[in-house]
């Protein structure tokens, strides 16, 4: 019997699975790590410890605990948070911490300047996206301006997934889906890097080569085999961003099928029949040639639940804190007794794209409890998700189904509120492992051992969440307050940012 290895590097935890040809999980392993916030608006990981270190730990643990012969692993698929920015030298050694995706907004100045230079209309036409905190190009320009010695020494500017693939195979490759998030460097019509748009930012030769996600791009080297316990020569696919692998894992494949990933952030992906162009959303080629995808994401979601636990539930055992807080939230009625929260604790990504946006808890009075505030936090994320879904509806691309995945689906208040506010049923799958399971499936597809439709056999549907009509009135009122609250405080938020040291 052969197996497929999938490993995903997340914001707070990495996971790996070994899966057999029928989709059965033979082994699982995970390892936590921290997100570093060296200053407000920044977010980083330590690539050697948090990315490669986690990969090595997980593969060794899987092989040790399952007893599976590494020579029976047919192929390896990797995914990771993204898009990130990591410069490495000629030997692949890291030159600094990895700068994370849209939760890091250090390059706000560069976003504004490059937008002015190229114009938003041209950026959307040629790159598929307006520039935001999610874009890697402005962060590379930030690096050039603030750390020119690192920029000059960088042989390759990686994202997290492409860094793992180079560590495994020595190859410098990146999937097209992720590359499109390196705006303004990637021209979608050419499916490649643009020398013109990259001028003054980075030489395109210092970027990984774009490939499709299921292309086998190399094999495990002898050095990587020694470190990981894997067999040298094992095929490695290009891989992709965690959210895309997660979408695959829950059967998102056709236009109108929308994945809602409940993770450290909410991330949304919907395949589309044609390219969707709207500055409030993101575009990328999908994982396979000739296909398209439209994406959206909130800046802070699961991250907020960690923040709340660490700041306001310190007396609780960390292992039991989330279930205890969930019970407190369940005791609060829908609408959290009039509280509305803006979850913009690291600025916000789609659809407002405002790095100066701030978190707000609105409507407090002396009767409110910790449970009310925690429920308002979860509902605020649900309102933010609905704001994104409504944006798709406004532009004529309303989703037909929501496919929910991620650890947050275990929080019934959060997941149920999302169905209640959006008015949509959320489909769940039998296995909720996430991106690492999708990685293993993509590895099987790459070898020809599975077709995309086989995910329904690998991971069948189970009961999900349906809207509760009893909650419609409460959430309708609260959601309108949510939508009005940001425009009403936007100028004050910007003033706070301008006055910040």
Image: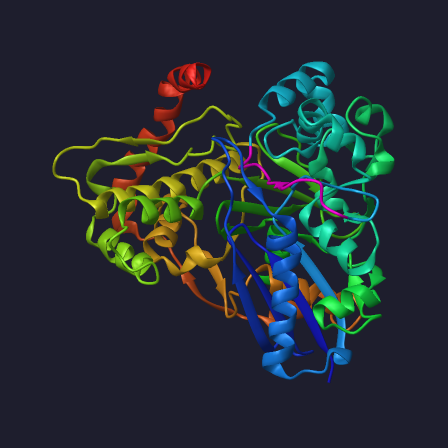
- Can residue 457 be spotted in the picture? no
Furthest residue toward left: 367
| Magenta-drawn stretch contains 487 | no
- Report the side of 238 relative to 408 (left or right): right
Q: Position of residue 425 (x, y in %)?
A: 43, 55
Q: Which residues are magenta?
A: 93-104
* Residue in the image at 51% along x and 34% along y: 391
**Quarter of image, res 152:** top right
Q: Position of residue 34 (x, y in %)?
A: 50, 50
* 388 is higher (above) or lower (below) than 228: above
* Residue in the image at 65% along x and 42% along y: 83
- Report the side of 473 relative to 450 (left or right): left
Q: What predominant SS class does the magenta segment belong to?
A: loop
Q: Position of residue 22 (x, y in %)?
A: 65, 79
* Residue in the image at 46% along x and 33% along y: 346
* Residue in the image at 65% along x and 21% along y: 110
Furthest residue toward front: 149
- Report the side of 285 relative to 193 (left or right): left
**Quarter of image, res 180:** top right
In this view of the protein, which residue sits in the foreground, 172 or 190?
A: 172
| Magenta-drawn stretch contains 100 | yes
- Can residue 116 be spotted in the picture? yes
Q: Position of residue 81 (x, y in %)?
A: 61, 49
In this view of the protein, which residue sits in the foreground, 38 or 191?
A: 38
In this view of the protein, which residue sits in the foreground, 75 or 409?
A: 75
* 382 is higher (above) or lower (below) than 12: above
Please give the count of numbered marks on the rendered protein.
0
User: In the rendered view of the protein, which quadrant contains the C terminus?
Assistant: top left
């Amino acid at each position: 019997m052969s197996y497929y290895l999938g490993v995903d590097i997340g914001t707070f935890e990495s996971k790996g699975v070994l899966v057999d040809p029928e989709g059965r999980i033979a082994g699982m392993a995970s390892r936590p790590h921290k997100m570093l916030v060296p200053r407000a608006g920044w977010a980083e990981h330590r690539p050697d410890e948090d990315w490669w270190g986690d990969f090595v730990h997980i593969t060794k643990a899987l092989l040790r605990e399952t007893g599976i012969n590494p020579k029976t692993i047919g192929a390896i698929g990797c995914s990771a948070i993204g898009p990130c920015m990591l410069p490495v030298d000629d030997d692949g050694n890291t030159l600094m911490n990895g700068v994370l995706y849209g939760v890091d907004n250090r390059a706000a100045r560069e976003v504004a300047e490059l937008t002015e230079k190229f114009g938003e209309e041209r950026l959307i036409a040629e790159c598929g996206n307006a520039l935001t905190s999610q874009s890697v190009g402005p962060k590379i320009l930030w690096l050039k301006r603030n750390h020119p010695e690192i920029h000059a020494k960088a042989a390759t500017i990686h994202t997290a997934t492409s860094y793992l693939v180079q560590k495994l195979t020595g190859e410098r490759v990146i999937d097209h889906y992720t590359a499109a998030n390196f705006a303004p460097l990637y021209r979608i019509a050419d499916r490649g890097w643009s020398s013109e748009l990259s001028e003054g930012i980075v030489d395109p030769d210092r970027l990984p080569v774009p490939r499709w996600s299921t292309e086998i791009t190399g094999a495990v080297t002898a050095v990587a085999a020694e470190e990981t316990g894997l067999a040298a020569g094992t095929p490695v696919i290009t891989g992709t961003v965690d959210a895309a692998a997660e979408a695959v894992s829950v059967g998102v494949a056709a236009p109108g099928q929308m994945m809602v990933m409940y993770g450290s952030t909410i991330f949304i992906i919907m395949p589309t029949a044609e390219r969707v162009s709207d500055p409030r959303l993101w575009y990328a080629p999908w994982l396979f040639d000739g296909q398209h995808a439209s994406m959206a994401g909130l800046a802070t979601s699961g991250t907020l639940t960690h923040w709340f636990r660490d700041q306001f539930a310190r007396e609780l055992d960390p292992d039991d804190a989330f279930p205890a807080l969930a019970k407190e939230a369940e005791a609060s009625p829908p609408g959290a007794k009039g509280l509305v929260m803006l979850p913009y604790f690291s600025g916000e990504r789609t659809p407002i794209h405002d790095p100066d946006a701030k978190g707000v808890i609105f409507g407090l009075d002396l009767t409110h409890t910790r449970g009310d505030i925690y429920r308002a936090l979860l509902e605020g994320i649900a309102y933010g998700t609905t704001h994104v879904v409504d944006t798709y509806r406004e532009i004529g691309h309303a989703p037909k189904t929501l496919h929910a995945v991620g650890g947050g689906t275990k929080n019934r208040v959060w997941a149920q509120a999302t169905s209640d506010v959006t008015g949509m049923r959320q489909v769940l799958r039998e296995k909720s492992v996430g991106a690492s399971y999708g990685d293993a499936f993509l590895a099987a597809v790459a070898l020809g051992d599975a077709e995309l439709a086989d995910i329904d056999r690998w991971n069948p549907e189970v009961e999900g969440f349906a809207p509760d009509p009893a909650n419609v009135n409460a959430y309708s009122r609260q959601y309108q307050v949510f939508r009005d609250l940001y425009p009403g405080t936007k100028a004050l938020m910007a003033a706070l940012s301008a006055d910040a040291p």
